[in-house]
Image (cartoon, helix red, strand yellow):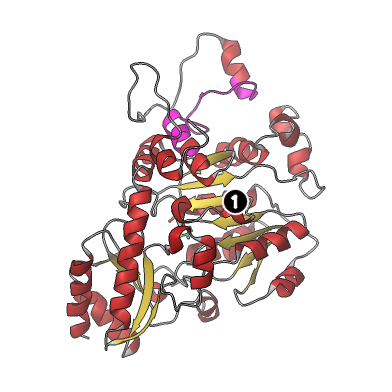
Amino acid sequence: MDKNWKIETLAIQAGYEPENGASRVVPIVQSTTYKYDDVQSVADLFDLKREGFFYTRLANPTVDAFEKKIAAMEKGVAAVAVSSGQTANAFALMNIARAGDHVLALSSLYGGTVSLFTNTLKKAGIEITFVTPEMDEAAVNAAIRENTKAVFIEALANPALLVADFEMYAKVAHAHGVPLIVDNTFPTPILCRPFEFGADIVTHSTTKYIDGHATAVGGIIVEKGGFDWCNGKFPEFTEPDSSYHGLIYTRDFAAAPFSVKLRVQLVRDYGIPMMPFNAFLANLGTETLHLRMERHSSNALALAEFLRNHPKVSWVNYPGLPDNPEYGRVQKYFTGSMASGVLCFGVKGGRAAGEKVMNSLKLAAIVVHVADARTGVLHPASMTHRQLSEAELVAAGVSPDLIRVSVGLENIEDIKADFDQALARA
Ligand code: PLP
């Protein structure tokens, strides 16, 4: 791999370099185990003295190729692929914070992440408090505590479609010696590379655009490298790990201590890695990610313009519209001012009229998903965000009439015609 390759080339070529006569396409290594000739080889692998594969719960060649590709595209030093986006976000935090620690998060996160933070991680003793997108630097700064270990934001909030002010959150996090974690699922590395704006860790639900065809649930955590884990706040990185004969991550794996620790502690112990076939599908999807993100974005912009001129539509939110309040940040942080493929709108007549429109769509299907080739719609208040309280719904930017559209790759005229006929029935 050439380090100077552009992102489109990395999307296709990075992560796998076949030897003479080997499979041109990343092969699916559907094997839990790997054969060795002598005991010492395996002992060395267990002791992390050399790289290699010994059990697919920890690492697998197909998954490894995908990890290397996404790390290269995000311009990070390493990545660890896991079973889902939920696992990616949970592990990103659990690798840094433990019982008694605090994490600051942005309130406009995906509902599943809010639920993970406010229920499951809370039960594990990690306290997560939320700041709202309107809060300025001073207010965010004031919300940091003595025991805060990370700041967590979503690059493009699902479904509020707010673009996070990366540089501001990075500034606050770094002033307190803690990393900024960014869930970059919606923009993908094609539209946005959070490491360029101060992030230290990036997560993805690869289930979304990276796979792009709604075939495989998965997640990945990417490490930028260079974060100062030795500033006294992160003893698990700097003190001997008794489960690995006293290994010290920052000393023994200085280039990527976060990723090694995450893999050998969390992936090993909880046992939720990405599976080889899912890695194969996610890797295949990534090969066309640059082409798909362009078309998702241009189709979404065209549908947003169509809907907002429609007499039956009361409002449209798409950050790629030049008069959208988020557009300035889209221009600042997203490649080519492309704003990804998700838009939200409300129908005159509110929730009931909106449901009628959803039920009348023919090409667009009602699906609990975003980011695949087929256009899909969802009503967050009664689907993905249904576990959230009224207050949490407001904080997440979900109004009762909000319809979320994941604009697919079909011909835009067919997509518009479908919404037109469905709106005529409302
Ligand atoms: N992060 C974001 C922004 C999401 O939209 C989702 C799912 O919709 C997740 C994380 C969770 O990912 P998964 O469904 O792969 O667990």
Q: Circle 1: is it few (<14), some (14-19), or many (20+) Cα within 10 Å?
A: many
Near-viewer residue (94 or 348): 348
Magenta residues?
Answer: 45-67
Q: Is residue 339 above or below residue 24?
A: below
Q: Does ligand 1 reach within 8 Å of label 1's beta carbon?
A: no
Q: Of all residues shown, which one is farthest toward the top?
A: 37
Residue 5 x, y percent position in the rendering: 47, 38
Near-viewer residue (167 or 398): 167
- Secondary element under disc 1, as helix, strand or loop, is helix
Say if residue 406 shows up in the picture.
no
Residue 59 magenta-highlighted: yes
Q: Residue at point 33% right, 16% down? A: 21
Residue 234 x, y percent position in the rendering: 76, 47
Residue 7 x, y percent position in the rendering: 45, 44
Quarter of the rendered image showing ligand 1: bottom left
Q: In this view, does 48 lie to the left or right of 237?
A: left
Q: Of all residues shown, which one is farthest toward the bottom?
A: 349
Residue 402 x, y percent position in the rendering: 39, 79
Residue kind at label 1, given as amino acid type: Phe
Q: In this view, does 27 lie above or below 322?
A: above
Which image quadrant for residue 61?
top left
Q: Is the magenta stretch mostly helix, strand or loop?
A: loop
Q: Residue at point 65% right, 21% down? A: 49
